Amino acid sequence: DIQLTQSPSTLSASVGDSVTITCRASQSVDSWLAWYQQKPGKAPKLLIYAASGLESGVSSRFSGSESGTEFTLTISGLQSDDFAVYYCQQYYAYPLTFGGGTRVDIK
Amino acid sequence: QVQLQQWGAGLLKSSETLSLTCAVYGGSFATYYWSWVRQPPGKGLEWIGEITDGGHTNYNPALNDRVFISADASKSQFSLRLTSVTAADTAVYFCTRTPSRYYGLDHWGQGTLVTVSS
């Protein structure tokens, strides 16, 4: 299975900050990586697909990038609604796998 | 507006079979891939398996052949069966949709908490 390692596991930030979350894959996943946001008691929400594609309806404050097997999610101008848990997911190979998650909370 | 609505038993005993169904409203059922994902309380996400638009299934080997996913296109529904459940199967189960093999999971059901007691 392809392992996805997210860092940090927890991130404390203030409204207005820009934050970056990293997801490192244990092997190549090409660009077949997605990012999700999950709030307590809710289903995850797709933010980014194909490493850098912005899902329809998602704020442009969210952006994704890749460098080899390292992927990053950047949130610019953090808003109160952005405090949540973020997951990466690869869909290059079966079984599809998720990272362990990064919690973004209020400093 | 596509909506996925899921239902099924929320409390099971060890060795019983988990059974969940997900109905798709407001969109096409054909040409999409339909998956199940689960999340143990306080933990991360685990992909269970999928059924493709051609009826082909792919499962997570970690579930040791206990999983079966089926679909009824005439009703725009797909289902999950997980046999011989244990406490380790206690989780919130989500049904999801993806437009193709190379896209993220773009629509999710509301989630169903399934608790397995011994």
Image (spheres, rainbow, N blue to C red):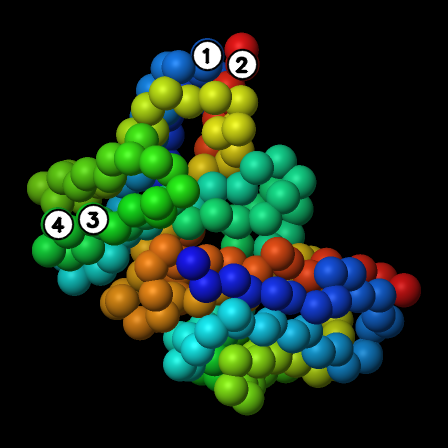
**Disc 2: which residue:** B117
Tell me the subunit letter for badge 2: B
Residue A61: x, y in percent? 63, 81
- Identify the amino acid type marked 1: Lys
According to the picture, the residue beneath numbered tag 3 turns out to be B57
Mark 4 residue crowding within 10 angstroms, few (<14) / some (14–19) / many (20+): some
Residue depicted at 55% across the width and 88% down the height: A67
Count of residue discs: 4
Q: Are marks 1 and 2 in contact (CB under 8 Å)?
A: yes
Residue, disc 1: B13
Against A58, residue A38 (above or below) is above
Question: Residue A94 lies in what quarter of the image?
Answer: bottom left
Which amino acid lies under the numbered mark 2 shown in the image of this protein?
Ser
**Element marked by disc 2:** strand
- Name the side, left or right, on which B92 lies relative to A82: left
Distance from label 4 to label 3 (Cα)?
6 Å
Residue receiving disc 4? B55
Q: Are marks 4 and 3 in contact (CB under 8 Å)?
A: yes
